[in-house]
Structures are given as C-alpha cells and as structure tokens.
Image (tube, rainbow, N blue to C red):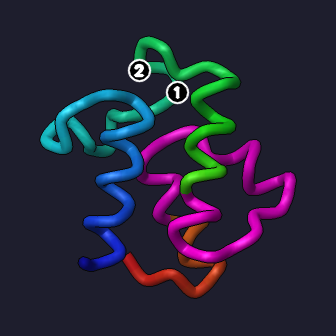
Amino acid sequence: MTNLEKLNNIFSEVFSVEQSVLNADFCKDNVEGWDSVRQLSLTTALEDEFDIMLDAEDILEVTSYEKTKVILKKYDIEI
C-alpha cells in the first residue's frame, strides 16, 4: 500500500467519507464534523500509521487534506 493510499484510508475512516471527496477543498472550514475530537483522531491515526510523533505546532496545522501532505513531508513521508 502506498503512503497516499494510507493517507486516504485514514481520512476516509476518520471523517466517514468516500475517498473520492478528498481534494484541495477538503479542509476544516468545509467539512461538517471536523471538530477537535476528529482532529485528535486524525493526528493519532497519522502518527500510528506512519510511525511518527507530530510536534504540537504540526498537530494544530493539520487543518486540511493538502496541508497534511505538506506536514508529512516534513517527517520524510513521501506522498
């Protein structure tokens, strides 16, 4: 499984959406139900799946699908 597939699975599971809706518009401001609990679930799933430890600043910055890709690259996770 590629890292992109892993990322898509995480977003799909955390937000209960089809992977086809994951695009540049998928963000905190546009997704109903993207709250602090889902934010925590998302960051925890990312850490577990990619075996990383996000720093506090990055956890707060995980506010969109595209931004998450950028943050993962900081941890040498190629998407």
Q: Is residue 18 left or right of residue 32?
A: left
Residue position for label 2: 31
Q: Which mark is residue 28?
A: 1
Q: Quadrant of residue 15?
A: top left
Q: Is residue 16 above or below residue 71?
A: above
- Residue type highlighted by circle 1: Lys
> Does 51 appear in magenta?
yes
Task: Residue type at mark 2: give it.
Answer: Val
Q: How packed is label 1: few (under 14 Cα within 10 Å), some, or many (20 or more)?
A: some
**Looking at the figure, which quarter contains the N terminus?**
bottom left
Q: Secondary structure at mark 1?
A: loop
Give the residue at the far top of this rendering.
32
| Residues under numbered marks 2 and 1 in contact, where contact means CB atoms less than 8 Å apart | yes
Task: Specify start and end residues of the magenta stretch as a single range.
Answer: 46-69
**Which residue lies at the image location 38% right of the left edge and 44% below the top edge?**
11
Disc 2 packing (10 Å; few <14; some 14–19; many ≥20): few
Q: How many marks?
A: 2
